Amino acid sequence: MDRSNLSVPKHSSAPSSVDISITGKCNLKCRYCFYSDEMAALNDLSTDQWKSNIKKLGDARIMRITLTGGEPFTRPDIFELIDTIIENKMRYSVLTNGTLINEKTIEAFKVGKRRLRLDSVQISIDGSCAKVHNKSRPESFDRAVAGLRLLKKEGFPVTVRATISKHNIHDLEAMTAFLLEDIGLPSMTNNEASPIGTGCTYKEEVALDHKEILATGLRLEKLQQKYPGRITAQAGPLAKLRMYKEMEDARKNGETTNRWKMGYLSSCGGVFNKLGILHDGSIVPCSMLHDLTMGNMLSDDLLERWENSEVIQEVRDRCVVPMSEIPECSNCEWVEFCNGGCPGIVQQIQKTIMAPSWRGCYRNFLKANNIESVYDASSPEEG
Amino acid sequence: MCKDNTYLRNPDVALREEDESGSLLFNPDTGEVLVINDTARFIWELCSEGVTMDDIVHAFAESYDDLPENLIEDVDSYLLVMTKGGFIGSK
């Protein structure tokens, strides 16, 4: 295919946001953690090294930092690092398991501009009760919910992400009611456990198959109707069903989506305005692409790497690779509409980014569910 | 805007250069972003030290040959937007 008229969109002059894994240490051992192998293999940077790196991010005019891990609150210096973010004119969010949040944490957040500059605290909750949640996130439900309730009570911008797996698919309705009604969260988001990292070791135990994706997605759609505007998903069953419907709409009515470039490996736009930094300072295109290192904050210039790294440019270049050039896809009737799925999952499973993710394949999804269209599917209650 | 006011940058606001869309100001206290053109950028630069409306108009006259007829109204509206968003302060 002639690609001469195709061009890769221009990336921003600097990333607008950066995800920083400030530690590889975690007080939990979740059954689907995609980052577990790297935690053991890499050493955490010191406080001074992180403070220096955060200053570099401020100098590069990054606007937002997301602190992740490991578990960010295992670092005793976390508020020192947050203060460095504030001093360097940035805002921040925290992704946490919630188990280490207590009254002292709340008081610490109240110092200076820590609260003012906080975009959100996201806690992972995977069930309506300890029995369900703890299957994925052992011995943590009570502490996580206590942390969540505390933040909610104090009026913090707190959100919850539920990771859907075989462990909790039977609990969706109860979990949603627990979070949106009992706890009273304004909204929640969900994704799914992927067979990468620890999730690969426990693949049979956690990862959903195509039939479970369909059944779960339909139930989540019903929950969306019950709680309008309060359940969102960027990945997982709900997001997949929405994507499949957009593919159907494009094929039948020509209603192309603006969320990806149909027929190209174009699912990921993150590499045009975001970056990730691992807990040893490695610069990566995304935390899901943590084995594709672009450099290290300790020795490399972030903006030079953003501009010139062949690693991130290759991920950006995916968006002009036609699905029709991929041998396994060339004869697929959906080739003009597909986007190839998340490059992070492809990289972790197939060790290349220039391929589609079979876990998101619509053709396989239809075949496994023995249906001709996602619109033909109905929830179990409807028959 | 008041003619006698002095305008000064909010020291917490960051200026970000963008290749195609010009520049933008980011107020980390509110999360608000303001895309600015060359005129607004010029005003922003002047506000590194306290300046009045007259100072700003005078600086434009010294730096550019062709001044738009409605320069004062333009400066006034830029100052209003930047003040409202907390990107600059006035007293």
Image (spheres, coloured by chain):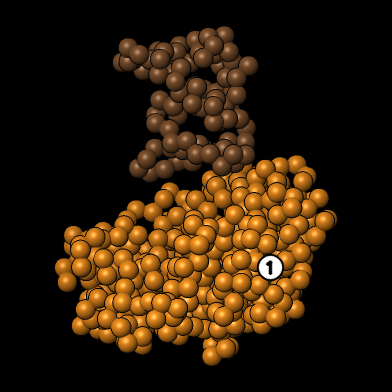
Chain colours: A orange, B brown
Residue at horizontal 25 percent and vertical 76 percent from the top: A334
Q: Nearer the viewer, residue A382 or A198?
A: A382
Instruction: Using the image, determine if residue A234 lies above or below residue B47.
Output: below
Number of marks present in the image shown? 1
The residue positioned farthest toward the front in the image shown: A382
Q: Can residue A135 be seen in this view?
A: yes
Residue A264: which quarter of the image? bottom left
Position in image of residue A301 (x %, y %):
53, 56
Q: Which residue is drawn at 63% across and 60% down?
A: A181
Q: In this view, does B10 lie above or below A279?
A: above
Residue at 31% from the left image edge and 57% from the top image edge: A258
Place of residue A75 in the rendered image (x, y in percent of width and height, measured from the top left):
75, 64
Chain of residue at mark 1: A
Q: Mark 1 points at which residue?
A: A97
Farthest residue in the right direction?
A104
Instruction: Provide the secondary structure element on which disc 1 rests.
Output: loop
What residue is shown at x 36% (from left), y 85% (from top)? Answer: A369
Q: Nearer the viewer, residue A141 or A264?
A: A141
| Quadrant position of the C terminus of chain B in the picture | top right
**Image: B89 above or below A129:** above
Q: Tell me the quarter of the picture where residue B90 sits.
A: top right
Residue neighbourhood size for the residue with mark 1, other residues' Cα within 10 Å, grouped as few (<14), some (14–19), many (≥20): many
Whether residue B65 is visible here, answered yes or no, is no
Query: Residue A303: x percent and y percent?
Result: 49, 53
Left or right: A183, with A362 as reference point: right
User: Which kind of residue does numbered mark 1 sit on?
Assistant: Asn
Q: Which of A142 and B2 is in front in this view?
A: A142
For the view shown, which residue lies furthest in the left direction? A2
User: Based on the displayed image, in which of its 4 quarters is residue A257 positioned?
Assistant: bottom left
**Image coords of residue A64 (percent x, y):** 57, 50
B2 over A115 or under it: above or below: above
Image-based side of B75 in relation to A324, left or right: right
